[in-house]
Amino acid sequence: MDQTPLAERMRPAHLEDLIGQDHLSAPHTFLYKAIKSGNVPSIILWGPPGVGKTTIANIIANEVKAPFYTLSAISSGVKDIRDVIQKARFQQGVVLFIDEIHRFNKSQQDALLGAVEKGIIRLIGATTENPSFEVNAALLSRCQVFTLNALDRKDLEAMMHQALEKDVVLRKKEVELKETDALLRISGGDGRKLLNLLEIVVDSIKEEPIVITNEIAMEVAQRKVALYDKSGEQHYDIISAFIKSIRGSDPNAAVYWLARMIEGGEDVKFIARRLVILASEDIGNANPNALLLATNCFEAVNMIGYPEARIILSQCVTYLASSPKSNASYMAINQAQALVRQEGDLPVPLHLRNAPTKLMKDLNYGKAYQYAHDYENNFVQQEYLPDKLKNTKLYDPGQNPRENELRRQLQKLWGKKYGY
């Protein structure tokens, strides 16, 4: 039995067999003429997942009859790019396809520039993100951008019927698509996901004829398909599990959910950004180094990109999960903002006001302000809050070694004023 996934088995080799994207594949279009003539320039294919970007790249490889190399931006680095460029120097018309090119960082994209500019390689980049923001301007200027549209219901249903009629495995079975709404909904308009889900559903039904209903499709999907949709519900469920695992001090669960996001193709900057937020919200002054590491992690993964960024993310995630926790500073700003909304714009006490002019000094701006560094231990007790909020405590240090130390320091300075 063929173990190749259905979506791969059904991938067309000719433009005429492509479902959807008529604005690119019709005989009068530029891309059609370029492919048929063999004169394909460097291009960027931009569109949602599963709408034909990789398929068009494979059609180009098949019809142009040129040396064809494939790299994934998730698992490849500068060395892999240079290896292909070196091989291309000894071949004519080499086409290099890079899937998810937006995941290449600046240095990785820069490594392509010279070879594209000199015509050593013809680049085909596939991206789900706006190339204007995610592809270097210098590289983008050397490529033509083609936008792929989301597949509509007619396209998706045509793909399923085509698979049942032409696939070497499915056409041997008696299959009836009685209901298709669930298949279409679960696939989210992703043609690749749709075909592979169709195959799983067909394989799960042992008796023939195989009648596919919405109920069967939903039951099979929930039981067998572990999907990670970057724009769907699972995206939010998994990031929630990830954050809660770190907050709950479980590095094992945290790194598992990290792996789920990485394998699902989650944006490295999205993950790192959440870690920076968590370092303050859930760890804070219990371990100030957490924010330093998370910030450095964000900068590092932005420079490095996948696949090596996974190592940096793992280091940061396991450190944050293993760190003592405190949400005291997070709670402090929440309470302070609530107080501002409740009390409005209370006046700044006169002694704390700036007094750059004689008139302001005459109005007692800055009068009686006590400069802390003029006093022993660089501290003097005075009121810093508006009169209406005197003695209001907003920051209550957490119960952990570092914040207990801060509490002792505040008790020493302020005594009973704030009730530390």
Image (cartoon, grey):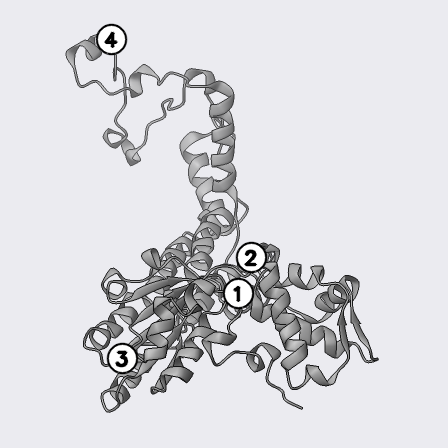
Say whether disc 4 or disc 2 marks the residue closer to the N-terminus.
Answer: 2
Q: Amino acid at mark 1?
A: Met
Residue extending furthest toward the right: 207
Residue 102, x across and y down, in percent: 37, 64
Instruction: Report whether 189 appears left or right of 130.
Output: right
Of 85 and 156, nearer the camera is: 156
Q: Is residue 55 visible?
A: yes
Disc 2: which residue = 239
Give the residue at x 49% y 67%. 265
Up/down of 134 relative to 350, above or below:
below
Of 154 and 140, nearer the camera is: 154
Tag 2 and tag 1, C-beta contact below 8 Å: yes
Q: Quadrant of residue 307?
A: bottom left
Give the residue at x 50% y 72%. 18
Residue 121: numbered disc: 3
The alpha-carbon separation of the residues under discs 4 and 3 comes to 74 Å
Instruction: Report whether 341 appears left or right of 307.
Output: right
Residue 261: numbered disc: 1
The alpha-carbon separation of the residues under discs 3 and 2 comes to 39 Å
The alpha-carbon separation of the residues under discs 2 and 1 comes to 8 Å
The alpha-carbon separation of the residues under discs 4 and 2 comes to 55 Å
The alpha-carbon separation of the residues under discs 4 and 1 comes to 60 Å
The alpha-carbon separation of the residues under discs 3 and 1 comes to 32 Å
Q: Nearer the viewer, mark 3 or mark 2?
A: 3
Question: Is disc 2 surrounded by few (<14), some (14 to 19) or many (20+) residues within 10 Å?
Answer: some
Q: Quadrant of residue 76?
A: bottom left
Badge 3 element: loop
Up/down of 205 relative to 47, above or below:
below
Q: Amino acid at mark 2?
A: Ile
Badge 1 element: helix
Say whether disc 4 or disc 3 marks the residue closer to the N-terminus.
Answer: 3
